Image (cartoon, grey):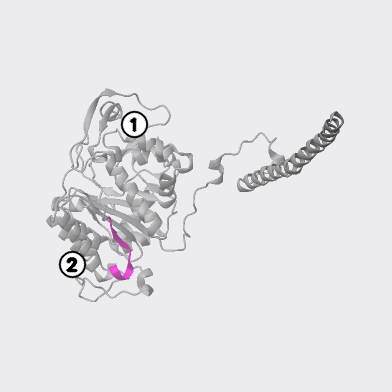
Amino acid sequence: MKNHIASILSRLSLLLPMESNNKQQKKTIWFLPLVCSFLFCFLFISASLFSYYGLSPFSLSLKTPVFAESKLHISSTSSINSIPRIAYLISGSTGDGESLKRILKALYHPLNQYVVHLDLEASVAERLDLVDFVRSEPIFAKVGNVRVVVRSNLVTYTGPTMVSNTLHAAAILYREGGDWDWFINLSASDYPLVTQDDLLHTLFSFPRHLNFIEHTSDIGWKELQRAKPLIIDPGLYSRQKSNVYWVTEKRSVPTAFKLFTGSAWMMLSRPFIEYCLWGWDNLPRIVLMYYANFLSSPEGYFHTVICNTEEFRSTTVNHDLHFISWDDPPKQHPHFLNVNDFQRMVGSNAPFARKFGRNDSVLDKIDEELLSRSADGFVHGGWFDNGSNMSSSAPQYSPVNATMLRPGPGAERLKLLINGLLSQEDIHEKQCI
């Protein structure tokens, strides 16, 4: 019996090393593929990252750092040999529906793009009437270059919601408006003093990267009354329109960037609008958040962004392309213009003027003497020449004659203005100072 037990134990002692060796072999079998798979994945991911950022694994010793911003650049402008195209925002509030229709027809050209916005203070009926007007106008439907913001924003005139509304329209035009060269923001209180043929013909000769924006860093009294106080715009969170209100705390003037102020009305280049929307170095977003608590932020946001960005600072032209009659010193709102201001408007050579009352008689005078436009009609131009029936709401139009421009006296006036601005000896000294 003892001999039998000893025999069994002897056999077990021989089997145990064999089992141990088998386990070791199994570990070796799965461990090596695991290590190889890990190394392969590491090399694949590394190669992908180097390829994506245009790097070489052998260039890591270089001292020059590579930032994400270096992969981004300012977009090019259209050829100066092509007719420029304008992207318009025309905005209004309650009671401005008819004024928006009038200015839209006075500004219309098939080459341009338009976004029309009535804010939430306007009644649903008034907003729907504007939508029906655009949809039912045959030329708008045929060309497809007029868009109404159906989901309206609540806009406070002196608050940041006006800036956000402008950026909203610019984003729509950037995404859906095709190729355009300049962005112009107008209100229902504005009106053109030149035809679109005048405007496009004149701009044809000038660089497309220019930004017409009145600006200064001499903020004066605005430092105490606007930069340091903190305001809240209820339009950011409320469905009911109300005035901005102040909080008790105050803040210091920024040191991360320099404040600029100027006119809320401007003509901005497509590259700069693209920069404001994308903000690849984050400055546009930082400045936007700062101006969320700034009174009259439309008079400072774009000005501060452009003058604190090296790529765009030298593209500024210190003019807003408007005739505006202010008090001296300027108050919050300009004077309402009337027929007594007509000659001064024309003499300014500006392509736009403001502020006009609804259906003021001076608008009829502008239509008749400057735009050759009849009531409810479009403006005479190369794309629209319907004989004596200039009040037609459905002009004969074909893509062939959209590029035919017939400039008039307004083109000469506007050319004088822009040439005068660009030929000033101290033009560079007036940029962002």
Can you say whether 49 is above or below 352 in the image?
Answer: above
Whether residue 425 appears in this view of the structure is yes
Where does residue 361 sit, x and y in percent of width and height?
12, 57
For the image, the number of numbered tags is 2
Which mark, by number, is residue 218? 1
Q: Position of residue 263 (x, y in %)?
A: 29, 42
Q: Does residue 148 belong to the magenta stretch?
A: yes
Is residue 374 positioned above or below 225 on the image? below
Quarter of the image containing the C terminus? top left
Would you say 58 lies left or right of 382 here?
right
Q: Give the residue at mark 2.
A: 374
Residue 426 falls in which quadrant of the image?
Answer: top left
Instruction: Say which quarter of the image contains residue 29.
Output: top right
How many neighbours does mark 1 have within 10 angstroms: few (below 14), some (14-19), or many (20 or more)? few
Where residue 341 sits in the image (x, y, percent)? 17, 50
Magenta stretch: give its range: 141-149
Secondary structure beneath dot 2 equals: loop
**Residue at screen point 15% across, 56% down:** 362
Q: Residues within 10 Å of mark 2 (few under 14, many from 20)?
A: some
Please tell me which residue is depicted at 31% across the width and 71% down the height of the picture. Answer: 142
SS under mark 1? loop
Q: What residue type is labelled 1?
A: Asp
Q: Nearer the viewer, residue 354 or 117?
A: 117
> In the rendered image, is residue 423 in sight?
no
Q: Name the N-terminal-most of marks 1 and 2.
A: 1
Q: Would residue 331 appear left or right of 140 to someone viewing this image?
A: left
Question: Label 2 is placed on what type of residue?
Answer: Ser
Q: Which residue is drawn at 35% across and 51% down?
A: 170
